[in-house]
Amino acid sequence: MGEAVNDLRTLKYVAEIARRLAKMLSRTRYQMLVYLLEMTAVEADSLAAEQDRDRQDENKPPRN
């Protein structure tokens, strides 16, 4: 999963799927699993946003 972690689309996909699973399970007694999935989604979104900022910074020309 080395390169997959660095792929912005993969991170966003993981967040989306985790949120869908959490929503499905939120009606059941598996609240700890729901919490874990929600935190996974938050972390994936955070990593995606960080990598998106890094990529934008790389594309900017250096200031003189």
Image (cartoon, grey):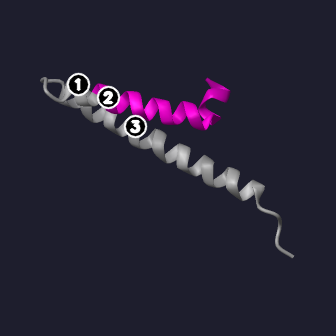
Dot 2 or dot 3, earlier in sequence: 2
Q: Quadrant of the C terminus?
A: bottom right
Cα distance in 3D space between marks 3 and 1: 14 Å
Please report contact status of discs 2 and 1: CB closer than 8 Å, yes or no. yes
Q: Which residue is mark 3?
A: 41
Above or below 28: residue 40: below
Provide the secondary structure element on which disc 1 rests: helix
Q: Amino acid at mark 1?
A: Met
Where disc 2 sits, the SS reads helix
**Residue 5 percent coordinates (x, y):** 60, 32
- 63 shown above or below 5: below
Residue at 24% across, 30% down: 23
Task: State the extent of the magenta-drawn residues as a range.
Answer: 1-21
Q: Name the residue beneath numbered marker 2.
A: 20
**In the figure, is residue 28 to the left or right of 48?**
left
* Residue 29 falls inside the magenta stretch: no
Residue 10 location, quadrant: top right
> Do the residues under discs 3 and 1 have CB atoms within 8 angstroms?
no
